[in-house]
Image (cartoon, helix red, strand yellow):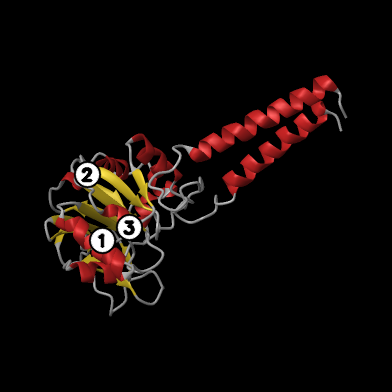
């Protein structure tokens, strides 16, 4: 095989590698490279533009003044050393924002001394944005930097929180669905539930949102209520944002000690694959090597 043929083979190989790398994690729920409805590619694109940084080691939380740690849909509980790192982080006057449905954050909240806990229930409501009762509306209850300009948000099968100061509540037409029949039964009372609360812990602030799906593409694409404004408030905090990539479904791949990732990496891989493929086709057409 001559040098020209080797060059073409190399171009094809590079293109295939780029395509494989891009699509290998594209189906991961909450995945940052997942462009489907359940991914978070839109959010992470906006986070990149606002200068957020990914956190791959909790030891790196020390010496981070003026910072907010954002935890989206953690997939496992936190080790004692990580909880201590979070406690020290709050002690330095920083902020932790947790978006979880109750699977793995309550141990962290309890050991931090936070008064808020997440109840892993399924809420439904007559007061909803769309026909399905899971599409619950949440209304701003208290003024806060996170709720500025937000009148209502659309939720997607949220759980709820207890304790702390409620910032966003459902309406009184909401119930905890217990048997899956999607209607209010005699033992399912209509009342309002807190879905977004804050608490002061040590010298810092903890925010708890019981619906992590507000960050997924499907919810970001909704042309309804104030979801985009809510996300913008999160990203425009004056604090530096660190996004947990140790436990979360959105986690990417990084080497030990990494604190950041390549911005727009998914888009970059798409561009590389496209350019290489086009170059290969043009080269083959004109050279007639094969």
Look at 71% across and 33% down and name the residue there: 11
Q: Quadrant of the C terminus?
A: top right
The label on residue 43 is none
Q: Quadrant of residue 125?
A: bottom left
Give the crowd class for mark 1: few <14, some 14-19, many >=20 residues within 10 Å.
Answer: some
Image position of 50 with respect to 75: above or below? above
Q: Is residue 114 visible?
A: yes
Q: Assess whether mark 1 and mark 3 are in contact (beta carbons under 8 angstroms).
A: yes
Q: Nearer the viewer, mark 1 or mark 2?
A: 1
Q: CA distance from mark 3 to mark 1?
A: 6 Å
Image position of 56 with respect to 148: above or below? below
The label on residue 150 is 2
Q: Secondary structure at mark 3?
A: helix
Give the crowd class for mark 3: few <14, some 14-19, many >=20 residues within 10 Å.
Answer: some
- Residue holding disc 3: 58
Residue 272 placement (x, y as % from top left) = 60, 33
Q: Assess whether mark 2 and mark 1 are in contact (beta carbons under 8 angstroms).
A: no
Q: Is residue 250 left or right of residue 158?
A: right
Look at 68% across and 41% down and name the residue there: 16
Q: Quadrant of the N terminus?
A: top right
- Residue holding disc 1: 85
Look at 73% across and 28% down and name the residue there: 280
Q: CA distance from mark 1 to mark 2?
A: 32 Å
Give the crowd class for mark 2: few <14, some 14-19, many >=20 residues within 10 Å.
Answer: many
Q: Is residue 183 left or right of residue 199?
A: right
Residue 51 placement (x, y as % from top left) = 33, 37
The residue lying toward the viewer, choosing from 282 and 90, is 90
Q: Is residue 230 visible?
A: no
Q: CA distance from mark 2 to mark 3?
A: 32 Å
Considering only order in the chain, which callout, 2 or 1, is on the residue closer to the N terminus?
1
């Amino acid at each position: 095989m001559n040098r020209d043929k080797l060059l073409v083979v190399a171009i094809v190989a590079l293109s295939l590698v780029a395509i494989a790398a891009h699509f290998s994690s594209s189906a991961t729920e909450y995945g940052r490279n997942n462009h489907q409805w359940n991914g978070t590619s839109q959010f992470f694109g906006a986070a990149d533009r606002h200068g957020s940084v990914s956190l791959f080691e909790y030891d790196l939380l020390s010496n981070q003044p003026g910072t907010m740690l954002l935890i989206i849909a953690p997939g496992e509980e936190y080790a004692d050393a990580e909880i201590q790192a979070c406690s020290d982080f709050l002690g330095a006057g920083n902020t932790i924002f947790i978006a979880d449905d109750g699977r793995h954050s309550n141990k962290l909240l309890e050991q931090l001394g936070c008064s808020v806990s997440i109840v892993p229930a399924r809420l439904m409501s007559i007061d909803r944005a769309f026909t399905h009762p899971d599409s619950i509306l949440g209304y701003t209850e208290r003024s806060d930097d996170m709720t500025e300009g937000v009148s209502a948000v659309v939720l997607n099968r949220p759980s709820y929180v207890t304790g702390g100061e409620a910032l966003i509540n459902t309406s009184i037409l909401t119930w905890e669905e217990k048997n899956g029949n999607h209607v209010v039964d005699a033992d399912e009372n209509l009342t309002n539930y807190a879905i977004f609360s804050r608490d002061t812990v040590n010298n810092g602030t903890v925010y708890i949102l019981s619906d992590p799906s507000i960050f997924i593409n499907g919810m970001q694409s909704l042309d309804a209520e104030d979801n985009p404004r809510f996300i913008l408030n999160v990203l425009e905090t004056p604090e530096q944002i660190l996004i947990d990539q140790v436990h979360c479904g959105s986690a990417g791949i990084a080497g030990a000690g990494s604190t950041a990732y390549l911005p727009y990496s998914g888009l970059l891989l798409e561009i590389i694959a496209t350019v290489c493929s086009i170059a290969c086709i043009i080269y083959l057409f004109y050279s007639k090597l094969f």
